[in-house]
Each structure stands twice: as structure tokens, then as C-alpha cells.
Image (cartoon, grey):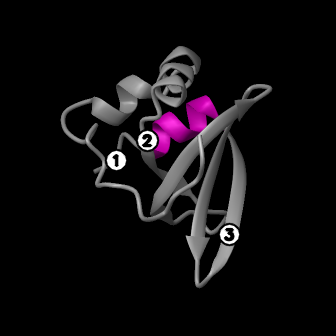
Amino acid sequence: MTFSPESAPNENAGKGGVLNKLTAQGILEAIEKGEAVEVKVRRSSGEIEGGWQVIGIEGGNVVVAKKDKGVGKTKYIPIESLREANKET
């Protein structure tokens, strides 16, 4: 799956849509289908920031990416931390 910040709006939005995808199996299935999974990430400052896209799983972490001011950023986040950040609306 290729990172594309211009991807369509998250079709998985809605009650539990993103949270249902945030399991190892759900992420792998979404990647196989070419589905974009947009998530929120808790920054080191504690702020929740949206607009990150899941691009894979490595070890026990979910790999997310975002393009910010023309620079690509990548983070490795434990699945449980990502699920917690995406419970908040």
C-alpha cells in the first residue's frame, strides 16, 4: 500500500469503524484490500492529531505516516496506544 495524503475521505468513519480496523488482522486485511485507514495519533506533547494514515505493521507496532508541510513523517505506535487515541472523538 502506498502512502497517499490525498486519499479519499475515510470511508470507515462512523461508529466503531476505525476502531474495528485497529487490530493486527484488521490492519492487514485493509492493506491487502488497498483500503486507506486514517487515524489519530497522540503526539509526544499529549495532543491528539488527526490525518495520519496506517501504512503497515512492524513487530508489535502500527506504522503510520503523514505529510506535513511537504515533509513525510513516520511513526511506529503500539496498537493499544493507537486504539486509545482513536476512542476520543
Q: Residue at x 19, y 38 (%)?
A: 14
Q: Residue 67 vs residue 89: left or right?
A: right
Q: Amino acid at mark 1?
A: Glu
Image point 42% across, 26% down: which residue? 21
Give the extent of the magenta segment.
78-85
Viewer-side residue, 35 vs 26:
35
Asked which quadrant contains residue 78, the reply is top right
Residue bearing the label numbered 3: 72
CB contact under 8 Å: marks 1 and 3? no
Relative image position of residue 84 (x, y in whole percent): 48, 38
The residue carrying pointer 3 sits among few (fewer than 14), some (14 to 19) or many (20 or more) residues within 10 Å by Cα, namely few
Kind of element beneath mark 3? strand
Tell me the CA gap for discs 2 and 1.
16 Å
Quarter in which the N terminus is drawn: top right
Point out the frontmost of discs 2 and 1. 2
- Secondary structure, magenta segment, majority class: helix
Kindly check if marks 3 and 2 are in contact, taking CB atoms under 8 A apart as contact: no
**Residue at (28%, 37%) from the top-left corner?**
12
Of residues 46 and 73, the one drawn nearer to the viewer in this rendering: 73
Q: Amino acid type of disc 2?
A: Val
Sequence-first disc among 3 and 2:
2
Q: Which residue is mark 2?
A: 37
Q: Position of residue 32 (x, y in %)?
A: 53, 24
Q: Which residue is the site of mark 1?
A: 88
- Spatial CA distance of label 1 from label 3 is 25 Å
Callout 2: 10 Å neighbours few (<14), some, many (20+)? many
80 in relation to 40, above or below: above
Upstream in the sequence, badge 2 or badge 1?
2
Using the image, determine if residue 55 lies above or below residue 7. Answer: above
Q: Residue at x 34, y 47 (%)?
A: 88
